[in-house]
Image (cartoon, rainbow, N blue to C red):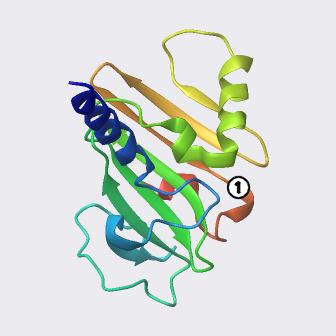
């Protein structure tokens, strides 16, 4: 019985680390998520209906990597050619593990949630170092977080899905 509890706990916790933290390198290796085509500002962002690519397009300012965690949350990492995640988006039935998703920016997320009026509305906060937009209700949570100083020229937050 004790082994069963440990196995259940491990199965629950390990998938939470299956995506990269904001500002860090993307996931690599066996847990590497689906690689979507890279996007250019002229052609718009990559979408979930894009064809998987064998690698990022060198002329594009960023590539998009998509994964789905154990809870069914779709995570998209927007990765610069320098191999740094400059933005993440999420959409799913529950909120993802924000500590794992935001990495060193998690403290900024906590601070942004404490500064506003509490209620059921969306969280739209940030500064020059970190921005977040998060909303949802039971069964559907979505949002995005990005680092403005890392955002490629010509790319706006609204371009990210």
Residue most extreme to the front: 2
Foreground: 95 or 120? Answer: 95
Foreground: 18 or 151? Answer: 18
In the rendered image, the vertical position of residue 36 relative to residue 4, given as above or below? below
Q: x%, y% of residue 41? A: 52, 73
- At 53% from the left edge and 69% from the top edge, which residue is drawn? 79
In the rendered image, the vertical position of residue 59 relative to residue 135, given as above or below? below
> Circle 1 is placed at which residue position?
148
Q: Which quadrant of the view contains residue 55?
A: bottom left
Direction from residue 153 to residue 133 in the image, left or right: left
Foreground: 155 or 69? Answer: 69
- At 59% from the left edge and 54% from the top edge, which residue is drawn? 22
Quadrant the N terminus occupies: top left
Q: x%, y% of residue 113? A: 65, 23
Foreground: 99 or 121? Answer: 99
Direction from residue 120 to residue 123 in the image, left or right: right
Can residue 76 be seen from the camera position used here?
yes
Q: x%, y% of residue 23? A: 65, 59
Can residue 33 be seen from the camera position used here?
no
Disc 1 crowd, CA 10 A, few/some/many (<14, 14-19, 20+): some
Residue most extreme to the bottom: 58
- At 56% from the left edge and 53% from the top edge, which residue is drawn? 21
Q: x%, y% of residue 90? A: 41, 44
């Amino acid at each position: 019985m004790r082994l069963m509890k440990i196995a259940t706990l491990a199965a629950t916790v390990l998938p939470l680390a299956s995506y990269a933290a904001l500002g860090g390198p993307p996931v690599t290796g066996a847990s590497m998520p689906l690689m979507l085509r890279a996007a250019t500002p002229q052609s718009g962002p990559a979408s979930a209906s894009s064809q998987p690519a064998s690698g990022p397009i060198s002329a594009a300012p960023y590539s998009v990597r998509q994964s789905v965690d154990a809870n069914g949350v779709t995570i998209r990492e927007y990765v610069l050619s320098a191999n740094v995640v400059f933005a993440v988006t999420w959409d799913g039935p529950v909120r993802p593990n924000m500590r794992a998703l935001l990495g060193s920016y998690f403290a900024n997320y906590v601070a942004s949630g404490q500064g506003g009026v509490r209620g059921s509305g969306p969280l739209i906060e940030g500064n020059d170092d970190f921005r977040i937009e998060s909303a949802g209700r039971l069964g559907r949570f979505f949002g995005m977080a990005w680092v403005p100083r890392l955002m490629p020229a010509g790319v706006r937050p609204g371009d990210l899905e």
